Every structure is written in structure tokens, then in C-alpha cells.
């Protein structure tokens, strides 16, 4: 009997497939269908920090207007615990989804500062969310801010959120760091329960006819697997929390590779947009078939088997593989497709 169960960030999962934050997870009915298709957990579509703050400020403004009955309530927003339509709907989505499904429901906030919004995670917890994913979106493009100043923001956000909640906090971040390995190791010890490698930034493109800035590819493709695969393999068993892989996981083979690298779970979305919810079942069948061939009864038997945890110097390990690849790669192989 093949056992696909796993755990991530303290959550027990029936298999390693988590549907990532996207339009696929924006309603209780859609999430119920994802559960029926085999999803082990879902990350709700992200609420943006700006939305939380804007609605808080809108209510603050209405309270301070001349015709407001109780101006004393201005002090209320030193400890805000009420929101307008968007944030209220988000809390309702958590509560309604928890009534419809038995799989873990992970809330998501896309954030860039440790500002006034950090009171809101407590309300997410009170609404029944099983965990909270912080999708921290800081592109290091500010020439007036140092790399160290950028990194401090991540710690500030995490520490501030952890003050308010007891549910597991998961951090999804990018690879834009001067010393990624050291940063991942340090941030994993802050008290978070999971790291997701990596989030997907908005990619700009140029329209050569209109000379306007447009959006690049929104969905990932299978070739994007290898960046997260490398870093899952490097960091597995070297961090203080669980690891999940994101971006480029489009089929069962990619899922197996991430598990071999040391991931506890994967987050998928693009492959479902392209192939539908049935792709979850196809991926799981592929994993089961491979496990039977290899003689594995559970994921724990091979998780991390190809990680670099036994290497004292991951950089040297990568260098050897780099040399083997390029020394053995011939021009005619590329031209003939061999």
C-alpha cells in the first residue's frame, strides 16, 4: 500500500500537493472541487497589505468626519479589529471554506512592510485558518536602500506577525538575496514553520508596436523548476523549518524531483490553469507508479535522498556538476538535438 501522506509547517497532509494562492482558490465552491480532485491543502488567493491599510484608513476617515456621532472612537484604531468590505469578505471566505472542506486552509497576505496591517493576522486566525502564508514581495530595485536594509524588512514583518498569532506562519519569498543560503537559514529560525521557494514576481514586457509596458508571462512553465530544485536540495536539513517548492512543478516527475531534493510539499497553480483540476490526480498517479517501481512504500523513505545535506561545501558540489556538464556538452549535440 503506497502512503503519500506528508506534513508541512505542522499541517498533516494526505499528499504533498498544495494548490497555491491564485484565482483557483478564491471561493469555497472552487476549493471544494480542488479537494475532490485530490488537493491536500489550499492557499487562499492573497489579500494585499495595501488593501488592509486602505480599508482601515477609509474607516478611520469616516470616524473623523464632522458628522460622525462618536468622535471618541478615533482611539479605536490604535487597536483596530474591524474592516470594510474586502477584508471582511476575506474573513468570511476562510470561515465558509472551513465549513465545506476537511483539508487545511492557509490564508495568504502579500506584504512589503511591517506597517499597520499586522493586526489583521489575528483576525485570520480567529476565522479558522489553519496557517498563514506571508508572500513577501520586495524587489531589490531601490538604489537608496542597501541589501541589509532590505533583509531587515523580512525579519520585521515576521516578528510583528508572530506576536499576534499562534497558527503556523509560512514565508514565501524570492531568490533576490546577496547570500541566499545564509539568509534562508537565519530566517528559518525566527519561529516560522515553513519556507516556500520561490514566489513569482510580476514580469514586465515591452510592446514594440505601441511602445508600452505590458505584462510578461503570467503562468510558469516546466523549465522554471530547476531554480527551486537547486535551492531545495541545498537547504534541505540545513534550515529550522519545513521546505516547500513552488514554480515550475507541472507534473508528477517534477513533484518526485522536489521530494528527492528534500521538499515536504509543493505548491502548484499554473499546471491547473493549463490542464484543469484533474491534473492533481494525474500527478499523484505518476508518483505512486514511480514509488511502486522503486519499491518505496512512503515518501519518508526517499525524501531528501538527492539533497546536498551530506556535502560540507554545497558550492563545491555544484562546481563539480557544472564542470561535468559543460566539459561533456558538445556543439553538435545541440544542433542535432541529441
Image (tube, helix red, strand yellow):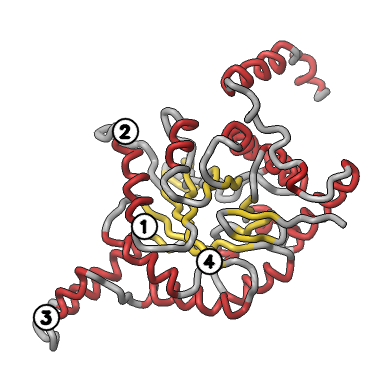
Q: Does residue 59 appear to the left or right of 207 in the view shown?
A: left
Q: What element carries label 4?
A: loop
For mark 3, what is the residue?
Answer: 72
Neighbor class of circle 1 (other Cα within 10 Å; few <14, some 14-19, many 20+) is many
Query: Which badge, 4 or 1, is on the more N-terminal residue?
Result: 4
Callout count: 4
Distance Cα–Cα, label 2 vs label 3: 41 Å
Tell which circle, 2 or 3, labels the residue nearer the N-terminal end.
3
Find residue 212 and report its horizontal and vertical position in percent: 42, 45
Q: Mark 1 points at which residue?
A: 161
* In this rendering, the label closer to the viewer, 1 or 2: 1
Q: Residue 215 carries which label?
A: none
Q: In this view, does 311 lie to the left or right of 327?
A: left
- Check the image and report above or below for 315 versus 302: above
Q: Which dot marks residue 148?
A: 2
Near mark 4 (Cα within 10 A), the count class, few <14, some 14-19 or many ≥20, is many
- Residue 130, numbered circle: 4
Q: Which residue is drawn at 63% across and 30% down?
A: 309
State which tag comes first along the sequence, 3 or 1: 3
Amino acid at each position: 500500500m503506497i502512503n503519500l501522506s506528508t506534513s508541512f509547517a505542522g499541517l498533516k497532509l494526505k499528499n504533498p500537493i498544495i494548490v497555491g494562492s491564485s484565482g483557483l482558490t478564491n471561493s469555497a465552491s472552487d476549493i471544494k472541487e480542488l479537494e475532490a480532485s485530490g488537493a491536500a491543502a489550499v492557499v487562499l488567493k492573497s489579500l494585499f497589505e495595501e488593501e488592509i491599510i486602505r480599508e482601515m484608513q477609509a474607516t478611520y476617515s469616516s470616524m473623523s468626519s464632522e458628522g460622525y456621532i462618536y468622535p471618541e472612537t478615533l482611539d479605536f484604531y490604535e487597536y483596530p479589529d474591524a474592516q470594510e468590505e474586502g477584508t471582511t469578505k476575506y474573513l468570511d471566505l476562510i470561515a465558509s471554506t472551513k465549513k465545506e472542506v476537511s483539508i487545511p486552509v492557509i490564508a495568504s497576505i502579500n506584504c512589503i512592510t511591517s506597517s499597520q496591517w499586522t493586526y489583521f493576522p489575528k483576525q485570520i486566525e480567529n476565522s479558522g485558518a489553519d496557517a498563514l502564508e506571508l508572500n513577501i514581495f520586495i524587489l531589490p530595485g531601490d538604489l537608496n536602500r542597501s541589501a541589509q536594509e532590505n533583509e531587515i524588512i523580512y525579519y520585521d514583518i515576521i516578528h510583528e506577525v508572530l506576536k499576534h498569532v499562534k497558527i503556523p506562519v509560512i514565508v514565501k519569498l524570492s531568490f533576490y538575496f546577496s547570500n541566499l543560503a545564509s539568509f534562508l537559514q537565519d530566517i528559518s529560525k525566527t519561529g516560522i514553520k515553513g519556507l516556500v521557494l520561490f514566489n513569482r514576481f510580476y514580469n514586465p514586457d515591452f510592446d514594440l508596436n505601441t511602445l508600452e509596458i505590458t505584462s510578461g508571462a503570467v503562468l510558469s512553465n516546466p523549465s522554471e523548476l530547476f531554480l527551486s530544485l537547486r535551492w531545495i536540495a541545498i537547504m534541505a536539513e540545513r534550515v529550522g523549518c519545513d521546505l516547500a517548492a513552488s514554480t515550475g512543478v507541472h507534473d508528477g516527475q517534477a513533484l518526485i524531483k522536489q521530494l528527492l531534493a528534500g521538499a515536504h510539499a509543493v505548491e502548484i497553480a499554473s499546471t491547473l490553469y493549463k490542464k484543469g483540476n484533474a491534473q492533481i490526480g494525474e500527478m499523484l498517479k505518476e508518483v505512486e507508479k514511480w514509488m511502486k517501481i522503486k519499491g518505496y512504500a512512503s515518501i519518508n523513505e526517499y525524501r531528501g535522498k538527492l539533497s546536498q545535506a551530506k556535502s560540507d561545501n554545497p558550492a563545491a558540489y555544484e562546481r563539480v556538476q557544472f564542470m561535468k556538464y559543460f566539459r561533456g556538452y558538445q556543439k553538435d549535440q545541440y544542433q542535432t538535438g541529441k
